[in-house]
Image (cartoon, rainbow, N blue to C red):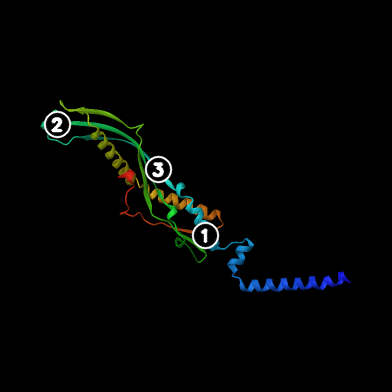
Amino acid sequence: MKALTRIPAILLLLAVGIILGLLLGQLLPRDLLSMISGGGTLGSRATVILERVQALAQLTTIRYNYSLMVTSSRDMPPLLAGLYGESLSFVAVGHVTAGVDLALLQAKDIVEQNGILVITLPPPALQDCFLDEQQSYVVRRDTGLFANPSPALDNEARRFAIQQLRAAALEADILASAQQQAVTAVTQLAQAFGQAQVQLNSTPPDPNAPLPLTCG
């Protein structure tokens, strides 16, 4: 008798479970059900992609290496330059780094349009200008009859060298290269997460963006 009374109870529980399952299927959003079942949706993938793209910040930089010669001299009339003047030639070895700061990417920058994941990247910018003191050196120094070598002139030569490194990198389109590298990296990442259709929109460099302290 005890075994017989258990059967109706089990059937009742099964019936309740089926009814609840049908109700949940009607009430819960399809996106949520898909996420629970492990399928994922475009919206959920976009959130994951945003987090992964932000982590790519250090991988989307590009560096241009340079070696160039600059000259620096004291500004004074020619008559005094022979007595108190000083000039030097300086070989500057260094590099300039640029990139797209993907940490600035926000949720509004990743949207879905007709089944295509559209990602708008932040603008490329200079990140660092570095003068390698171990490799850089003074080639020649000329001083007037009564002049002593001035550390200020050495510092001025270094500042001018950094400005020349920056100018050379910008002239060689380092920002465009950084932008293209970011587009390639983010596209590959999105496709790796199963998003076959991806559109990357690039933001042009900001001409008024402040320079990094090392590039001033």
Vertical side of 73 occupied by 33: above or below: below
* Image-based side of 26 in relation to 172, left or right: right
Question: Of 118 and 77, which appears nearest the observer?
Answer: 77
Say which of marks 2 and 3 sits in front: 2
SS category of the residue bearing label 3 = strand
Mark earlier in primary sequence (2, 3): 3
SS category of the residue bearing label 1 = helix
Residue type, mark 3 in image: Arg
Residue 141 occupies quadrant: top left
Residue 163 occupies quadrant: top left
Q: Are marks 2 and 1 in contact (CB under 8 Å)?
A: no
Locate the C terminus and report the quarter of the image it occupies.
top left
Q: Are marks 2 and 3 in contact (CB under 8 Å)?
A: no
Vertical side of 36 occupied by 149: above or below: above
Which residue is labeled 1 in the image? 47
User: Where residue 185 sits in the image (x, y, percent)?
Assistant: 48, 50
Which residue is labeled 2 in the image? 81
Residue type, mark 1 in image: Thr
Mark earlier in primary sequence (1, 3): 1
Question: Residue at the location (65% across, 71% down)?
Answer: 24
Question: Residue at the location (22% across, 31% down)?
Answer: 150
Which residue is labeled 3 in the image? 63
